[in-house]
Image (cartoon, rainbow, N blue to C red):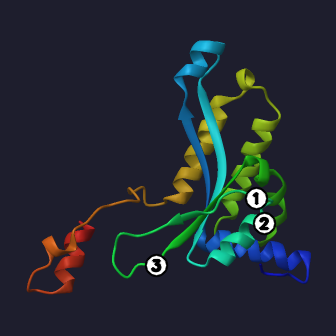
């Protein structure tokens, strides 16, 4: 595990990891059982940071700095010559303490962090039936747009061999981007 000389160095390093290989997410899901049983709104919110890297030691250090002792997921690619990646997901319990510490050092994901801290504050200070769902939905849409500014689907399956012809790589790129 990586050792740090100062607290500032530790939090700035963690902020750099999240800026480069991390994702600050707010997910919304519907639980139909919850609405039927408790007679409350059945929309639930998940606040989390996902971090993916090919170096397992870095992911383990990320986990420990986030206050997690949980599982590190191994992602093996089916594509030849692709390296194995490791992923860690940190939920609201850990984010509550860490996000304010890394906020000053974030550059790329500073706005997402600011929104997420506000969402966590709303979720912590209100009971399930009393939450302002319109405000949470507004924050959800803001983070979603910040994480995907072009509005395109992030996963697009393309079979390169089908599009490749004798004209070369330029035609391939234009056909894939259309």
User: Could you say where residue 89 lies in the image, as x and y percent from the top left?
Assistant: 64, 57
Q: Say above or below: 6 vs 156.
A: below
- State the CA–CA distance, disc 2 to disc 3: 23 Å
- State the CA–CA distance, disc 3 to disc 1: 24 Å
Label 3 crowding class (10 Å Cα cut-off): few <14, some 14-19, many 20+?
A: some
Q: Earlier in the sequence, mark 3 or mark 1?
A: 1
Rendered image quadrant of residue 154:
bottom left
Label 1 crowding class (10 Å Cα cut-off): few <14, some 14-19, many 20+?
A: few
User: Could you say where residue 142 lies in the image, as x and y percent from the top left?
Assistant: 58, 49
Give the label on residue 57, or none: none
Give the label on residue 64, or none: 2
User: Could you say where residue 20 lies in the image, as x and y percent from the top left?
Assistant: 61, 74
Q: Say above or below: 77 vs 45.
A: below
Q: In which quarter of the image is the N terminus?
A: bottom right
Left or right of residue 26, residue 171 in this image: left
The residue under label 3 is: 83
Label 2 crowding class (10 Å Cα cut-off): few <14, some 14-19, many 20+?
A: few
Q: Give the number of callouts.
A: 3
Dot 2 and dot 1 residues touching (CB under 8 Å): yes
The residue under label 1 is: 69
Residue 106 in view (yes/no): no
**Residue under the image location 76 percent in, 44 percent down:** 120
**Residue under the image location 54 percent in, 51 percent down:** 144
User: Could you say where residue 15 lies in the image, as x and y percent from the top left?
Assistant: 73, 71
**Residue under the image location 34 percent in, 73 percent down:** 79
Q: Say above or below: 127 vs 171.
A: above
């Amino acid at each position: 595990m990586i050792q740090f000389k100062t607290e500032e160095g530790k939090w700035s390093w963690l902020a750099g990891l999240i800026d480069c290989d991390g994702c600050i997410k707010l997910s919304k899901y519907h639980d139909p059982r919850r609405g039927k049983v408790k007679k409350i709104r059945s929309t639930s919110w998940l606040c989390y940071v996902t971090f993916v890297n090919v170096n397992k030691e870095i992911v383990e250090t990320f986990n420990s700095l986030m206050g997690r002792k949980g599982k590190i997921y191994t992602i093996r690619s089916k594509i030849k010559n692709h390296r194995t990646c490791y992923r860690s997901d940190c939920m609201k319990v850990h984010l509550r303490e860490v996000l304010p510490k890394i906020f000053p050092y974030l550059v790329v994901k500073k706005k997402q962090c600011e929104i997420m801290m506000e969402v966590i504050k709303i979720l912590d200070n209100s009971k399930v039936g009393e939450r302002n769902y319109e405000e949470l939905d507004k924050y959800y849409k803001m983070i979603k747009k910040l994480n995907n500014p072009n509005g395109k689907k992030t996963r697009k399956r393309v079979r390169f061999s089908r599009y490749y012809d004798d004209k070369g790589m330029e035609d391939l790129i234009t056909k894939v981007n259309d």
